[in-house]
Each structure stands twice: as structure tokens, then as C-alpha cells.
Image (cartoon, grey):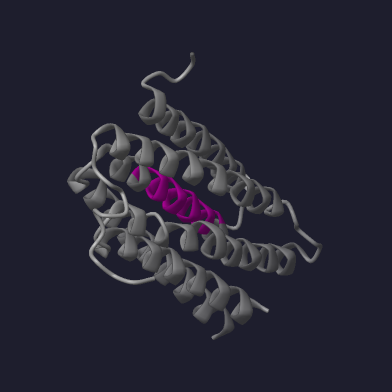
Amino acid sequence: MNAGFFAGAVIAAQVLLGLAMLLGVYRLLQGPRAQDRVLALDTLYVNAMLLVLTFGIRSGTTLYFEAALIIGMLGFVSTAALAKFLLRGEVIE
Amino acid sequence: MTYLAGALILSGALLAFAGSLGLLRLKTFYERIHPPTMGTTLGTGLILIGSMLYFSALESRPVLHEILIGVFMTLSTPVTYMLLVRAALHRDSAEGRDPLRSQPAKDG
């Protein structure tokens, strides 16, 4: 019973995060301007990172944690580079 | 302990979902930039605390390395969003549209 609630909660969390990623994809395709798409990409990678974390919780290994850390770092770099590109027209001047 | 961890993970996922819903539903870009921060800070924090509790209970020793992700997200989110808003303001002023005027008329 105790483990049943936890497994159900993690599965429900995964479903919610998957739906959140779908909403982000919709905004990514729909977004009227470029900054909306960048914002949707940022939301998308955060939700993907949380989804990888919940996969790690379900499987019980800490390997997924490192994947989530890498996703977080690369997402930060990519969003910063895209925002810099929108601001100046070049990433590295 | 696992009840608490499950509840924390579920509420964190709910917050992330609410953030994405706000990203979908709000009208202008300057309103839309607010909701995803809820998922990136509070949602990530709750899921990380739940994960720490669960792994600490599973391995019967304190497992704290998830703090790394929390610190990193807390530091990186304001930086990227401020860059993004600055880029949006620059684009709006370069195209001659007033960023405050493009919102629906509302006092606040």
C-alpha cells in the first residue's frame, strides 16, 4: 500500500510532465515571435529534465541524475546563446 | 517517508504543468515569461527534495547530490530570462512598437 501510493504518484507526475512538454511543443510551433519560441524551448528542456529525474526515481538508479544535470547545463547554455543571438544578431562577437 | 516523497514529486509535477499551461494561455510575451519560472524553481525544488528523500530512504544513507541541480537551476534561470526579456525589449523597440502598449489595457 505504501509503495503503491508512491509508484502511482510518480507515474502521475510523469504523465503531468509529459503533458507539460506537449504544451511547450505547441507554443514552440505556434509562438508568434522568436522570443516566444525561445521561451518555449527553455520550458521544454526544464520539463524534460524533470521527466528524466522521475525516470531515475522509478528505476531506483542514480545514473539518470547525471543525465538530468547535463540536460540542465546544456539547456542553460543554449537558451543564453539564443537570447544573445536575438539581442545582437551574433552569438560571439 | 515515501508518502511524503510521492506527495512532493506529484506537487512539483503539478507546478511544472501549471507553468506550461500559463505559457500556453497568457496573451503577451511579457506575461508569458512569468509562469515557466514557477516550474523551474519551485517545481524543480519539490521534485529534487522528493528524490532526495526517496533515495535516502532507499539506500539508508543521506543522498544529497540532487542539490547540485537545484543550485544550478536557481542560478541560471534569472540570467537566461533577463537576457531573453532584454532581447525582446530590444526587438520591440527596434521595430518601433511600444512594449508596454502592446499589452491589453490593464492597471497594475
- Highlighted range, magenta: A41-56
Residue B59 location in percent, x, y?
75, 62
Question: At 61% across and 42% down in the image, what residue appears?
Answer: A66
| Image quarter of the C terminus of chain B | bottom left
Question: At 45% across and 69% down in the image, what residue appears?
Answer: B15
Indicate left or right for A16 with B74 as reference.
left
Magenta span includes B82: no
* A75 vs B12: above or below: above
Indicate left or right for A27 with A77 as reference.
left
Residue farthest to the bottom, as pictured: A1
Foreground of the two, A76 or B56: A76
Residue B28 location in percent, x, y?
27, 56
Foreground of the two, B34 or B39: B34
Q: How many labels does the image show?
A: 0
Magenta part, dominant SS = helix
Question: At 62% across and 52% down in the image, what residue appears?
Answer: B74
Residue A18 location in percent, x, y?
34, 58
* B81 vs A58: above or below: above
* A76 vs B32: above or below: above
Indicate left or right for A42 with B55 as reference.
left
Magenta span includes A47: yes
Indicate left or right for B67 with B20 as reference.
right
Foreground of the two, A39 or B16: A39
Residue B87 location in percent, x, y?
40, 36
| Image quarter of the N terminus of chain B | bottom right
Foreground of the two, B59 or B11: B11
Residue farthest to the top, as pictured: A93
Question: At 24% across and 60% down in the image, what residue appears?
Answer: B27
